[in-house]
Every structure is written in C-alpha cells, then in structure tokens.
Amino acid sequence: MSVWMGMPAFPDAARKALADSQLRANLRAATGTIRAKRAAVVAERADWPELRAAGRAIKDRALRDLDNHLSLLAERVTAAGGVVHWARDAAEANRTVVGLVRAAGAAEVVKVKSMATQEIELNEALAAAGIAAYETDLAELIVQLGHDRPSHILVPAIHRNRTQIRDLFRRTMPEAPPDLTDDPEALAAAAREHLRRKFLAARVAVSGANFAVAETGALVVVESEGNGRMCLTLPEVLISVVGIEKVIPTWTDLEVMLQLLPRSSTGERMNPYTSVWRGVRPGDGPREFHLVLLDNGRTDALADEVGRDALRCIRCSACLNVCPVYERAGGHAYGSVYPGPIGAILTPQLRGVDADPVSRTLPYASTLCGACYEVCPVLIDIPRSLVHLRAKVVDVHRGTPSAERAAMTLAAKTFASPRRFALAQRLVRFGARLLRRTRLPGPHSGWTDARDIPPPPDHTFREWWATRTDTPVVDHATRERARLDSGTGAPERDGPREDHARGAGGELGAGNDVVLGPGGAEVLARVRSALGSAREDVEVPREYAHAVEDDVDVVALFAERAADYRAVVRRVAGDGGGTAAAAAVGQALRELGAASVVVPDDLPAELLSQVDGVVLRDRGDLTVDALDRVDAVLTGCAVAVAETGTIVLDAGTGQGRRALSLVPDAHVCVVRAGQVVGTVPEAVAATAGADVLTWVSGPSATSDIELHRVEGVHGPRTLVIVLVD
Ligand code: SF4
C-alpha cells in the first residue's frame, strides 16, 4: 500500500502542519461541524449501542470465516454475470485493471471515490499505461486538479478553502467561466459542467465498494453527489476494486450497516444515494462487471489477533473528527491515504510496522484519550491497537543499543526489586534537594520546557503507609510466588477452541475452482493461514429496533423526513381512479418548467393524463444523450422508508432502468401510502433478492467545499415526491 513518497515521520510532518494556522482553522471548523451533526442524529437512536454491537459482530463474523465468505461472494458474483479477479498486492491489482481497460479499448476512465484504488496508486499505474483517470467526486476532483493529496476520508479537500478552490478551477478547468466566484454553488456547478461530458461518454468506470454481500453477491456504494450512480450505471464496463475485508455475510446485515454508516459519516439519517447491484443486468447498466478482490497486506493484519480489529473499519471517519491529534495535525501528516486514528493503526499493519519512518511512528500519533473508540460505529478499540503496535515497534528494535533502551533497562531492574526501588527513591529525593533544580539538563530539558520539576515529597507512599498501619506492603511478585508455592497453579487461560477450519477447497465444492484461479487460491490460503484453527462462530445480536412504535404514523413521518432532506413533497388523497395523483404530477412538472418528461414504458397511463409537455416512453432505446436533453423523469418506486425519508427503486414495474432516474435534471416519484415502511430493516427485508437497487434521500448534494451543503451535483437537482394516501 502506498505511503506517500518522501513523507517524513509523523512527528516531523505534524510539526510542519502545526505551523499552518489556516489549516488548523479549517480543520477545527470542519471537524466541529461534522461532530455536531453526527451527535444529533446518533442521539435520535435510543438503540445506537445495540446497532454498534451488531455492527461489530457482523464484521467479526465476516473476518473470522473470511475465506468461506469470499468464496461464496465470488461464486455469487460469477453466477450473476460478473467476473472475479484476485489481487495479491497492489501491482497485481493495477495490472488487472490496466488490462481490463485496454481490453475495452478505452483510453480514459471515470472514477468513483475509492480509498482502495488510492491505496494501490491506480491513477499513477493507469497514467503510466497511457490511460487518463478522472476523479468524479467533487473533493477528489479538487485534489486531483491541484496535484494534491487527500487529507480526510469523507471530505478529502478539507484543507482547502473556497477561494483556493475557485483559483484552482479557474486555472485548470477549460469550462470554468472567467468570472467564476467562490460561491460553493457556482463551484459545484462548474464541476458538474466539467464532468458531465465525461460521464455521458465514458466507456469504463472504476469504483470501490462500501460493502460486498457474500450471500447474494451484491455490491453496495454509498455516496451523495450522484457521481457514483453515474459511474456505476452509464459506462459499458465497470471495474470495482474492493478490499477483501469489505465482505459482509448476509443481506440482512445491510440493515445494520446502512444505519451505522450515514449517521457516523456525514451525520445524516441516510446519505442521498445508495447503489446496490449484482453482476450484470441486461438492458440496465454496464454490459461487463469485473470485481477485483484485493489483499495487499490485509491478510497480514488478519493474522494479528489484536491488529485485525482494524479490518472492521467501515471508513466512516468519525474517529478523525473527534481526534485532538488529527484536528491539529491534519490528514497529510499521517503520510498515507488513511489519515487519523484509523490510519495510525491500519497503515503500519498493511505496510509492516518497521517498513518506513511513517509506519514506525504512526502508532505514537495519539494521546490514547479514547475518543475514537467512543464514536466508532463498529467498536474498534483503537487505543488498544495503538499500544499493541507500539509494543511491536519496540520489539522490532529490541537489542539495538540506545540511550533510551539503557535507561529503560535500568528502570526495569529498579522497579523489579522493592529494595532497589526504595533506594532509588531515596537517591532521587536526596539529589533533588541537593541540586534544587526546577529544570532538567541536556536532552531531558524538553520535559521541563513547559513545567517545573515538582519538589520531592518528604515521604514516599510506602513510608507514609508504614507509619499508619501494621499491614505489611506485599509486592505483586511476592504474592505471585506465594500463590505458585501454594500449588494453586498457573493463571487461567482460555479454554481450548473448537477447530472450525475448512478443507483447502472451502465448503463450496467444485464451483470454487471456477472463480478462484491461482491468485484467489493464494489469497484464500493466506486467509486460512492467518486465521489458523482459532475460528469462532460469532453470533450477531439483533436487539436494535426493527419497526417504529405502534403509534407512529409512518406516512406522515415519511413526508416529514423526506422534506427534511429537501425533497419537495406533495401529499394527495387517493381517489381510486388516480385523478388526484395525475393532477399532482401535472402540477409538479409545470412548476418545474418541464417541457419534456421521460417515463418507463410500463408506467400506468393514468398518471400522465394531466401532463402538458412531451412524453417520451423509454423502451431501453433512448441514448444517454437523449435522456440528458429531457427535462424530467417520472417514476414510481418499490418501497419508501419513513425514518430516513428515502425512496427505494428496484427497476421493477413503473421504475425503469437506473439511467432513467439519474440523467434528467428533475425526478418526480409517485409513492403510494401502502409502499411506506417504517424502518431501514423493513426496507432491506422488502427488497431482498433485487438485482439492482437505488436508495434516494433527497436531491444529489455535496458538502465538499467548506462543508457548505450544495444541492444538485451530478444526480437530479430536484426530487419531487407525490405521496398518494
Ligand atoms: S475506525 Fe471506526 S470510527 Fe474510524 S473510520 Fe473506521 S469505522 Fe469509522
């Protein structure tokens, strides 16, 4: 994985960053804002602890049986028409992607924000092969145009303010108007214009994925701007590079992850868009789908019983936003694509704790205050991992002479003997009184730059204790010796664990050979070796809420929450014949000024009875350019979620293919009251088995410029919901 070339050790990089007062101000404002948003939406959930416990168990369950889940995922993706590739390291992943792009005859690709592809430096590998890669997430675009580096997981350009972005766009974007202002709306519009043609013309897209569901072979991408939907839907070939730790065992597990991630990440009940797809769907989306499953050091982390916790990470960035070290030093100081507390434990494990100065020093980039653990949605005990990694760094250098090591050896000998310890205390007290210094000399002076040496106490604790009680002071070593002498035996250890190791072929039979290949066989062998025989069957506690309270009016709640996320909601009475709904649809389109509207071919005709403009029926024959010229799209949906104000489209009756509800600038969606469910778990259950899903919560949006929310980026700028009782 990539540690950025030439990056100094964390202390040096942090010192430089601390001198940048503008950076510190940007970070303070941004992290404070996201913290407050997250706290507000988390506080809405009384069952947040239960959701976190479930999230941890789901990821642990996946990791403790990773080889079997990966095998199943590969089999399901293949069965759904996808092609699975395995990459043992970054070079193999890059070779695979370059080969696929060349085979598609493309000279450029559009990209969805993906940390895995940054980790393997895919853009650089593509450039070396003469292939241009265009980042399409607004923040990633800013980073790419500025030849810069991301500094935050969620808002990679958090270190840039709006004026800097305006100047960058003026300099690097041919489409940007010369009088472009630093208004975030204008900047987002310029980015939309810049990327629009690329989206519509791209033949190949590259993405990552937030989750990969082993049970169904579904991939899940969670995003806000609609650039993800554009990349996942419009090109002919889709290549998804996904770390092997992104697998989750079952479809039901999504009901937990889709609640934990948005609230922890953007501080929303639900992010604007979530795309789910399985393999290839004829007539809807890419004709080819390639899944590249990436190891690149993950199996090394898996082999470490403490360090493997980091593989639970769902990249929400909540730990960054509460970290006092990150808030002051910023993301670049962490020297790799993974900044903040998660980077401090992930980078050294993927690279090796002694691989370079960055990896060696990152475990110390923390005060161990524990704030990261408090907010982590999957309960990663980052401080515990940091201490563990510090011990590993020390172990690597054990035996190398140094002044610190000599001092520690002396201290260890002193602390190991009560007699020596008491003698040392007396010597220190005597010396301090004699010298009467408040500062330490020489290389130790740093300790006393900002504080004085306290005067030594008149008595040590032991001396004080001896004057007040007859109880002898018994040290731990003496107690332990006595316990052993009394024959009570060694301290208890964990009981023997059941050996659940599978055979070399896993549980899935002959199908494995078809989808594995040599790369897959080796990755799975590494996983098995990392897990050894100490497998555990992890139970997932599902004590979180599955339904809203009985007295909640879910339809009213849906209307309220959808409006919260800036959808325009028109609630009309159902009249059996659909006249009221048709009137509301006609009215909505008139207010949008839509002279043309595209509809799925199977949309009920009565909904169009009061539409004034041109109506195009899509039979799968409209080109993307034709869709781009249409003013609006009218669809139904599969289900709507009250607690998050989300509509879910599954490409079923009256919904059409995914491009339909994506390319036109306004989306009018008819939702029947009977389609509204209360919660995310109910919606996940209702859509099990779907080949494609698009979860939509309001219009597309970005907060990538100084966290100022701008509606309408690449997806429709307006969402109108006609809610029919
Ligand atoms: S470690 Fe936890 S809080 Fe930090 S990014 Fe990962 S999941 Fe989020």
Image: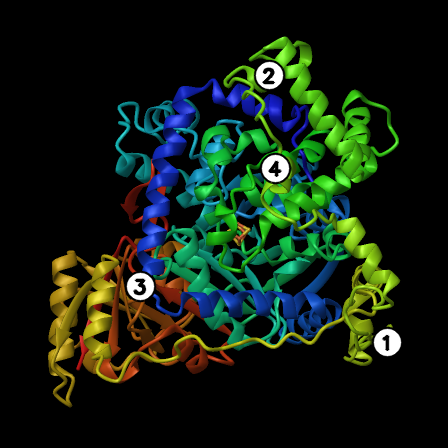
The residue at which mark 4 appears reads as: 461
| In this rendering, the label closer to the viewer, 3 or 2 | 2
| Rendering coords of residue 269 (x, y %) | 34, 61
Q: Earlier in the sequence, mark 2 or mark 4?
A: 2
Say few, some or many: other residues with alpha carbon within 10 Å of mark 1 (under 14 / 14 to 19 / 20 or more).
Answer: few
Q: Could you give the CA–CA distance between mark 3 and mark 4, rounded to whole angstroms? A: 48 Å
Say few, some or many: other residues with alpha carbon within 10 Å of mark 4 (under 14 / 14 to 19 / 20 or more).
Answer: few
Q: Earlier in the sequence, mark 2 or mark 1?
A: 2
| In this rendering, the label closer to the viewer, 2 or 1 | 2
The residue at which mark 1 appears reads as: 503
Q: Earlier in the sequence, mark 4 or mark 1?
A: 4
Dot 1: element: loop
Identify the image quadrant of residue 29. Answer: top left
The residue at which mark 2 appears reads as: 446
| In this rendering, the label closer to the viewer, 4 or 1 | 4
Residue 131 seen anywhere in this rendered image of the structure: no
Q: Quadrant of the N terminus?
A: top right
Left/right placement of residue 316 relative to residue 361 reads left
